[in-house]
Image: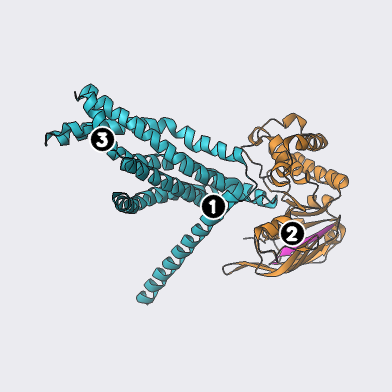
Chain colours: A cyan, B orange
């Protein structure tokens, strides 16, 4: 009896998960299709880029500044053991551009804007605003989801660039100002060590993370359960799912991009 | 005209609608009444095409909503609908002006200038001029219902659906909403469907009344026929008694 019950539970879990996975992919495909289908409403996209991108700039700048500073301290400490403190600049810049910039930017935007997007759409769902859109023959996927997905894809790489620049500045300030490294060495080593492939790699990652951000945040809000608890659950799931997805996808992207660009 | 033909809808093992059949004549208003949880709002969502019935057909102005598979086909049929939701369902990020203009601008693709005069006209008719620049949370629920009605009527739909018109309203505001529905019926002459559990208040806006219970329409007639109905469940519900065939859940 227990074996049957356990098998049923496992089977039910597998079916539910597969169904959810399928629904979320259909949702993504419908949103992408809505992006390219007229009529276009540029002002809706502008509003979302403002809310998701521009309004995240302060927090991204702050996190970037201190991440760069910490990397400089840690890099100088580690490299000093090998007599290679001259490479502190490249250590800071490559870590930021290739890895920490895209990942930390994505995690911060997911935490700040992803939860807000899910909560906003979730509340629209439970207060019948999404039903109202449909009753007026306005497609909620096109009106609500497509601008948010596009804003994530556009804003994330730009925020990541900002994170990198501010982070390198933070690293420079600490390495040169506090740890006594030569400014010329710091910058020249960055110029000679960082290639365009590193920048492309980070840019591609940030774009994919932007897609994950928009997809998960919108999907969780759109499929939100009933009442305040439903919104609460959807918001939590949105942040956790998107953050975990970013870290998992990051590993695979890093593996693929390293092979592609190193060739 | 709305025609509901033998509609069934279940959620899992729970049967909500079990063969509902109903016709609403053009220009007339029918109230669907019944206790909470009998599927009145589900029926409304089926008519709007937001849910799909397990069985049966729904026609709106002669077009089969249940046969419409694609969202664009459903949207074509929805163009003849105006809906006043239970909580008005206004967009809280938009002003009242923008809420009223929304279907004209976003659905009909009317320019802001062309929509402007229509918004002012309907706001004037429904005494909303002074609230146009407010946001929904800045006005009372009664005003929000009026705005919801303005938004439903601005595209001059042939069919208007109203879900629980006086939920959350005090008796004065509730009466104001019924007066508003009657005034709008006279001015715009739409076919109406009103979902309510407020008896006998809803009779004042209804040409016919249908009572739904156990997933079926158990009684239908004019308001005076319903008041005189020999059906024990209708009488229990009308008189608000706890004893009778309707079990309190």
- The residues bearing labels 2 and 3 have C-alpha atoms spaced at a distance of 84 Å
The local crowd at label 3, few if under 14, some if 14 to 19, many if 20 or more residues have their Cα within 10 Å, is few
In the picture, which quadrant includes the N terminus of chain B?
A: bottom right
Q: Chain of mark 2?
A: B
Residue under label 2, please give it: B237
Numbered disc total: 3
Question: Residue at left 48%, top 64%?
Answer: A19
SS at circle 3: helix
Q: Is residue B191 above or below residue A193?
A: below
Q: Is residue B13 visible?
A: yes
Spot occupied by residue A234 in the image (x, y as percentages of width and height): 48, 50
Name which of mark 3 and mark 1 comes first in the sequence.
1
Q: Is residue A92 left or right of residue B160?
A: left
Residue under label 1, please give it: A32
Comparing labels 2 and 3, the label whose residue is closer to the camera: 3
Residue under label 3, please give it: A192
Q: Which quadrant of the view contains residue A160?
A: top left
Q: Is residue B169 visible?
A: no
Q: Chain of mark 1?
A: A
């Amino acid at each position: 009896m227990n074996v049957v019950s356990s098998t049923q539970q496992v089977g039910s879990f597998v079916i539910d998960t597969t169904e959810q996975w399928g629904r979320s992919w259909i949702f993504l495909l419908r949103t992408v299709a809505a992006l390219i289908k007229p009529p276009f409403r540029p002002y809706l996209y502008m509003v979302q880029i403002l809310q998701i991108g521009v309004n995240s700039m302060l927090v991204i700048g702050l996190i970037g500044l201190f991440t760069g500073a910490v990397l400089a301290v840690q890099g100088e400490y580690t490299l000093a053991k090998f007599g290679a403190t001259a490479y502190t600049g490249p250590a800071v810049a490559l870590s930021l551009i290739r890895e920490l910039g895209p990942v930390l930017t994505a995690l911060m935007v997911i935490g700040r804007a992803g939860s807000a997007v899910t909560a906003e759409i979730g509340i629209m769902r439970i207060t019948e605003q999404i039903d109202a859109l449909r009753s007026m023959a306005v497609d909620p996927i096109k009106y609500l989801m497509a601008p948010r997905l596009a804003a994530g894809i556009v804003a994330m790489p730009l925020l990541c660039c900002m994170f990198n620049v501010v982070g390198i500045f933070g690293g420079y300030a600490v390495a040169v100002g506090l740890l006594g490294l030569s400014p010329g060495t710091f910058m020249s080593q960055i110029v000679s060590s960082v290639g365009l492939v590193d920048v492309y790699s980070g840019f591609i990652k940030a774009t994919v993370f932007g897609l994950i951000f928009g997809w998960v945040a919108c999907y969780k809000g759109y499929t939100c359960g009933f009442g305040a608890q439903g919104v609460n659950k959807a918001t939590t799931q949105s942040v956790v799912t998107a953050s975990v997805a970013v870290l998992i996808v990051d590993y695979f992207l890093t593996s693929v991009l390293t092979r592609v660009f190193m060739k | 005209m709305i025609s509901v033909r033998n509609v069934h809808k279940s959620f899992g093992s729970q049967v909500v609608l079990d063969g509902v059949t109903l016709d609403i004549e053009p220009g007339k208003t029918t109230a669907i009444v019944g206790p909470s949880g009998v599927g009145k709002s589900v029926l409304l969502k089926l008519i709007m095409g937001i849910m799909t019935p397990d069985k049966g057909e729904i026609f709106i102005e002669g077009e089969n909503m249940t046969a419409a598979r694609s969202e664009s086909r459903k949207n074509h049929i929805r163009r003849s609908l105006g809906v006043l939701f239970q909580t008005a369902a206004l967009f809280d990020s938009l002003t009242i002006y923008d809420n009223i203009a929304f279907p004209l601008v976003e659905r009909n693709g009317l320019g802001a200038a062309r929509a402007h005069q229509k918004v002012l006209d309907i706001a004037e008719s429904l005494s909303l001029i002074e609230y146009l620049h407010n946001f929904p949370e800045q006005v009372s629920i009664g005003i929000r219902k009026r705005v919801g009605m303005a938004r439903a009527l601005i595209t001059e739909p042939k069919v208007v659906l109203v879900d629980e018109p006086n939920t959350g309203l005090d008796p004065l505001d509730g009466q104001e909403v019924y007066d508003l529905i009657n005034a709008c019926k006279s001015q715009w002459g739409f076919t109406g469907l009103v979902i309510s559990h407020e008896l006998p208040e809803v009779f004042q806006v209804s040409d016919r009344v249908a009572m739904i219970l156990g997933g079926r329409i158990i009684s239908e007639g004019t308001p005076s026929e319903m008041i005189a109905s020999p059906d024990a469940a209708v009488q229990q519900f009308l008189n608000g008694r706890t004893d009778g065939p309707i079990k309190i859940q």
